[in-house]
Image (cartoon, rainbow, N blue to C red):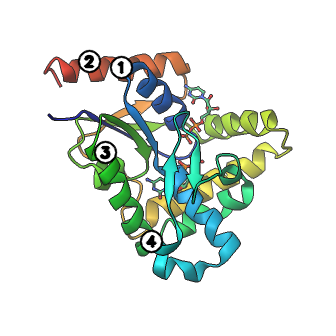
Amino acid sequence: MTHTRIAIDGPAAAGKSTIAKRVAAKLGYLYIDTGAMYRAVTLYTLENGEEIIDEIEDHIHITFGVNNEVYLNDQDVSEAIRSQEVTKNVSYIASLEKVRTYLVDMQRKISEASNVVMDGRDVGTTVLPNAEVKIFMKADPEVRAKRRLLEEQARGNNYTLEELTKDIVRRDHIDSTREISPLVQAHDAILLDTSHLSIEEVEDKIIRLVMKHLEGDL
Ligand code: CDP
Ligand code: CDP
C-alpha cells in the first residue's frame, strides 16, 4: 500500500505546526513535528553537554504521544522545549551533521508506516523528497513576530515584539544559510503566503490540494 505524505516547510511562525496538526486530525494522518525533535535534542544538550552528540543514539530517544506530546527518553518535554533558552540555541544544534543524520533517519522511518503530515525546514527537500504533496509556507516577518508575541503573552511571558522579531530573523538566517539541508523551497513545492489568511483558510487550501492529489489531479 502506498502512503500519502504531506510535507510542510517554511520559516519560523509561518503557521506550519498549527495548520499541520489540523490537517492531520481532519484526514486521520499522523502528525510529525520535526522542529520539536531538534528542540528536544537541544534541551538535552543544554542539560547534559554538547559532547553527547558524538553518541547521540545512546542518549536520545524521542517519541510522540497521541495528543502530539513530545517525549524525550520517556519524559514529557512538550512545554520545556518551547523555552527561550531552547529557542535561542536550536538553530545551532540543528546545523550539526550528526544531529541531522540521526533525526532525518528517524523521521523517514516513522513515515514508512503510515500517512503523515510532517512539518519542518527540510521535509520536502531532504526528509521526504518524494512526498505526494509539498507546501512551502511563508508570511511577512512582522506578521510572524506578532503571531509569536500573542503566543508568548498567552504563556504569560513578557517578551517585546522587537526581541521576538530579532529571534525570528536570526533563526531564519542560520536555517537558510547552513551547509546541510538549509531552509529552501523545494522546486516542486507549492508556495502559500499565510500573511493575510486565517488558520481556517490555510487549512482549507491544503485539504483541497490533498483531495486533488487523492483524485489523481496533482
Ligand atoms: O516553531 P518554530 O518555527 O519556532 O520552530 P520549530 O519548527 O520548532 O523549529 C525549531 C528549529 O529547529 C528551527 O529554527 C531550525 O533551526 C530547526 N529545524 C530544522 O533545522 N529542520 C527541521 N526539519 C525542523 C526544525
Ligand atoms: O510552526 P510554525 O512556527 O510555522 O508556526 P506556528 O507555531 O503554527 O505558529 C503560528 C502562530 O500564528 C500560531 O499561534 C497560530 O495560531 C497563528 N496563526 C497561524 O498559524 N496561521 C494563520 N493563518 C494565522 C495565525
Query: In the displayed image of the protein, which residue is found farthest to the front?
Result: 74
Give the residue type that dot 3 points to: Ser
**Viewer-side label of 4, 2:** 4
Give the residue type that dot 1 points to: Ile
At 64% from the left edge and 46% from the top edge, which residue is drawn? 78
Residue 157 at what x, y percent from top left?
84, 43
Does the residue at mark 2 contact the one at mark 1 (Cβ under 8 Å)? Answer: yes
- Residue 32 shown left or right of residue 7 in the figure: right
Residue 57, numbered circle: 4
**Which part of the image, by quadrant, shows the C terminus?**
top left
Residue indicated by mark 1: 207
Is residue 59 visible to us here? yes
In 3D space, how far apart are the residues under numbered discs 2 and 3 (Cα atoms)? Answer: 20 Å
At 33% from the left edge and 61% from the top edge, which residue is drawn? 105
Q: Earlier in the sequence, mark 2 or mark 3?
A: 3
- Residue 29 shown left or right of residue 66 in the figure: left
Residue 10 at what x, y percent from top left?
45, 44
Q: Earlier in the sequence, mark 3 or mark 1?
A: 3
